[in-house]
């Protein structure tokens, strides 16, 4: 209960379910491991396996990007990616009046606004945040999008804070609404997909999977599904996590410092100074994401591991 922050009634319901079920599953390998550790001291718990979440490649992926990659035509690939960015930036202009540049590295954080997902991490140190945003050598654009639950006052507070901060900067935007169309356009229009949950709090996460299917490089902490995919500076960039036993406040400060360092020293310089190396990471992400994180594998594993009678 201390690890998860769940209330007594939620805990008791979960315990009863794990005793009643024949088998249960975590939604990533790490989630399964953490779950087994959480419940191992209780009697009568059913086996807990791992079935990592996935995304539907047929729905999410931009087929023209894959076609250009398969043809080894970098010119067409780059042209297509810039086109996808322009389409996403039309929504930015419609909602905020800000004009984003398709030649500028664009980072997107887009998912449910929940406290543990730490949407505002880039703003934890305002001095370093402003340094990032004002770097003329390595310009950057940042988009946030998503929705907090109606009664999630922590998530709502984070959303409101980011909205207020973004008003000051021409290269920051917060988009409202997060239905399928906007989600798809942001995944296709981003260069880097940011995911920085407090370590061991993200069960799986799936947005980064669909982002990789559209030539967006995952930049994130190794939580949820990400450790099963990420190869640092090969198909993604891994933010080095701090000790999870530290206080949440100290974790936030240390993880934010690691993120700033990674962006300043590795992500931005590679994007601008070594575009061929950046493109290799993009392509590696697009190939590594399938078939392991496609929904066909997911459906097969649920049948084989959970539903099939033994």
Image (tube, rainbow, N blue to C red):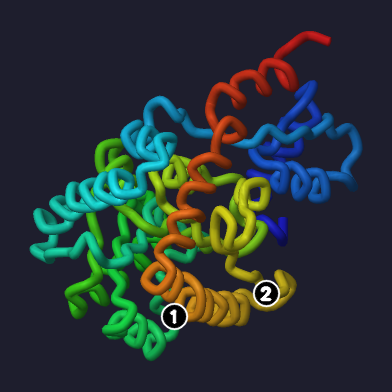
Residue 193 position by quadrant: bottom left
Camera-side residue of 256 and 217: 217
Point out the image quarter for the N terminus: bottom right
Point out the image quarter for the C terminus: top right
Residue on which the image places disc 1: 124
Camera-side residue of 94 and 24: 94
Element carrying mark 2 = loop
Horizontal arrangement in the rendering, residue 196 relative to residue 112 (left or right): right
Residue 244 appears at what percent x and percent y?
A: 71, 70
Q: Are marks 1 and 2 in contact (CB under 8 Å)?
A: no
Label 1 or label 2, whichever comes before in sequence order: 1
Label 1 Cα neighbours within 10 Å, binned few <14 / some 14-19 / many ≥20: some
For residue 202, above or below residue 244: above
Camera-side residue of 182 and 274: 274
Using the numbered discs, state the Cα–Cα distance from disc 1 to disc 2 in whole angstroms.
Answer: 16 Å
- Residue at left offset 43%, top offset 75%: 269
Residue 144 appears at what percent x and percent y?
A: 32, 60
- Residue at left offset 56%, top offset 53%: 235
Residue 200 position by quadrant: bottom right
Camera-side residue of 65 and 232: 65
For residue 131, above or below residue 181: below
For residue 245, above or below residue 277: below
Horizontal arrangement in the rendering, residue 11 relative to residue 310 (left or right): left
Residue on which the image places disc 2: 242
Label 2 Cα neighbours within 10 Å, binned few <14 / some 14-19 / many ≥20: some
- Residue at left offset 30%, top offset 36%: 180
Residue 81 appears at what percent x and percent y?
A: 29, 49
For residue 42, above or below residue 19: below
Element carrying mark 1 = loop
Among all residues in the image, which is located at the extreme top? Answer: 309
């Amino acid at each position: 209960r201390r690890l998860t922050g769940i209330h007594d009634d939620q805990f008791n319901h979960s315990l009863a379910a794990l005793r009643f079920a024949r088998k249960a599953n975590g939604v990533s390998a790490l989630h399964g491991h953490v779950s087994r550790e959480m419940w191992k001291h209780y009697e009568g718990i059913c086996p807990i396996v791992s079935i990592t979440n996935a995304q539907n490649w047929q729905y999410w992926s931009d087929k023209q990007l894959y076609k250009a990659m398969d043809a080894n035509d970098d010119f067409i690939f780059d042209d297509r990616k810039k086109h996808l960015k322009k389409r996403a930036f039309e929504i930015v202009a419609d909602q905020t009046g800000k004009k984003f540049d398709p030649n500028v590295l664009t980072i997107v954080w887009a998912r449910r606004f929940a406290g543990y997902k730490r949407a505002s991490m880039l703003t934890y140190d305002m001095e370093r945040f402003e340094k990032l945003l004002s770097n003329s050598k390595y310009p950057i654009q940042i988009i946030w999008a998503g929705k907090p639950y109606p009664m999630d006052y922590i998530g709502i507070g984070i959303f409101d804070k980011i909205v207020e901060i973004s008003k000051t900067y021409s290269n920051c935007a917060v988009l409202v609404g997060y239905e399928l169309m906007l989600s798809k356009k942001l995944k296709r229009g981003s260069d880097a997909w940011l995911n920085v949950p407090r370590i061991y709090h993200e069960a799986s996460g799936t947005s980064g999977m669909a982002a990789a299917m559209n030539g967006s490089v995952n930049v994130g902490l190794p939580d949820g599904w990400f450790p099963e995919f990420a190869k640092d500076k090969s198909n993604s960039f891994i933010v080095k996590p701090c000790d999870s036993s530290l206080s949440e406040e100290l974790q936030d400060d240390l993880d934010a410092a690691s993120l700033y360092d990674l962006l300043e020293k590795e992500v931005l310089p590679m994007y601008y100074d070594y575009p061929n190396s950046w493109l290799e990471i993009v392509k590696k992400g697009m190939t590594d994401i399938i078939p392991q994180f496609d929904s066909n594998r997911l459906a097969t594993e649920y049948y084989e591991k959970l539903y099939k009678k033994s």
